[in-house]
Amino acid sequence: MCGGGCLFGDYWNCTYRGILWSSLGVKADGDTDNSQALNNLPTGVPIIGDCPLGGDIWVNSTWIWKSNMTLNIEAGCQIVSNVSGVGSYAISQSDVKQPLTNVTVVGLQIRKYASVSTERIMLLWVNNFVLLNWTVTASGGVMFLRGSNQEIAYGKVTGTYPMIGNPGIRHIGNQPSVPTSPGRPANVYIHDNDIQSGDATYQACQPLGTFIWTDVSTCFMKTTWGSPQHLPCFSLERRLPTFRTGRAKTSESTG
C-alpha cells in the first residue's frame, strides 16, 4: 500500500510517497513485538512510518538498519525499545566493521523502555547518512557513530541517564571518507540539535573498541546545544585535524 494523494492534506503521504510500514506488518499498538517487521522492511524504496492504531511501536530486539534505507516517520509514531543490558543498542547493523551507505531517516522518535546507564540508542558505521527531525526521550547514551558525508540535524534528546558513560553524539571518525554532498559545509555536519546527556554531549574522534580509531576531517557543529551532567559539552581528541563549532576551529583536545 502506497501513500497516495493530497486530498485530505496528508502531508507525509503527499510529500514522501512510499510504502506504509503498517502494510508490512508494523503495528503501533503498544503491545506487539515489531522487531521482525522492522528488520524485514525493504530497501531501495521510500518507507512511510505510520501508526494508524495510535500506540507505541514496541521492539524487543535490536533494529538492524541496512544500506539504501529511506524512512519518513509520522509525528507521534514512537518506537519503544526493550533491548536491555550493559552496552546494548536499540539500533545497529549486521556487521559494524563494514560501512552501510545511503541511509536517510526523517522523523525518528525512539526511547528505551527505561533510562538505564549504558543502554544506548544507536551504534552505526554509515556513509552518506542523513538523520533529521529526530527525538530520543529515554536512554543510557544516544549515538555511537562512524562514517562520512553525514548530516545530523534538528534533534532533541531528553531523559539520558545522568552519569559518565552516557554521551550524546560520540563520533568515532570519518576515515576513510567518501565525498561530501554539494552544498554541505562539512563532511560531518551536525547542527541545530539540543541534547541532554550524562557524559560529554558532543564527542569527536573518539575511539571505540569495536572500531579502529579514525580521524574526523571537517566536522562542523553549528547552532547546537548540549546539557551534560558531567564533563564538558564538547570532547575532542588530539588526532582531530579540523573541527569547527560555529566559527571556532581547533586541532587540540578541549574542555
Image (cartoon, rainbow, N blue to C red):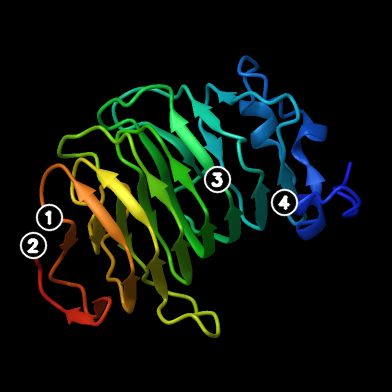
| Nearer to me, 75 or 183 | 75
Task: Check disc 4 and give the amino acid type.
Answer: Thr
Residue in the picture at 37% in, 22% down: 114
Task: Check disc 2 and give the amino acid type.
Answer: Gly
Image location of residue 65, percent across then percent down: 57, 45
Badge 1 or badge 4: first in the primary sequence: 4
Q: Which residue is mark 3?
A: 108
Q: Which residue is mark 4?
A: 43
Q: Residue furthest top?
A: 31
Q: Measure the C-alpha gap from mark 1 to mark 2.
A: 5 Å
Badge 1 or badge 3: first in the primary sequence: 3
Q: Measure the C-alpha gap from mark 2 to mark 4.
A: 41 Å
Q: Secondary structure at mark 4?
A: loop
Q: Quadrant of residue 56?
A: top right
Q: Which residue is mark 2?
A: 255
Kindly report which numbered mark, 4 or 3, lies closer to the viewer in this rendering: 3
**Do the residues bearing badges 1 and 2 touch, measured as CB atoms within 8 Å?**
yes
Q: Describe residue 19's horizontal placement relative to residue 119 as left or right.
A: right
Residue in the picture at 19% in, 39% down: 165
Task: Check disc 3 and give the amino acid type.
Answer: Leu
Kindly report which numbered mark, 1 or 4, lies closer to the viewer in this rendering: 1
Q: Measure the C-alpha gap from mark 1 to mark 3.
A: 27 Å
Q: Residues within 10 Å of mark 1 (few under 14, many from 20)?
A: some
Image location of residue 92, percent across then percent down: 48, 42
**Do the residues bearing badges 2 and 4 touch, measured as CB atoms within 8 Å?**
no
Image location of residue 19, percent across then percent down: 81, 46
Q: Residues within 10 Å of mark 2 (few under 14, many from 20)?
A: few
Q: Measure the C-alpha gap from mark 4 to mark 3.
A: 17 Å
Q: Residues within 10 Å of mark 4 (few under 14, many from 20)?
A: some
Task: Check disc 1 and give the amino acid type.
Answer: Pro
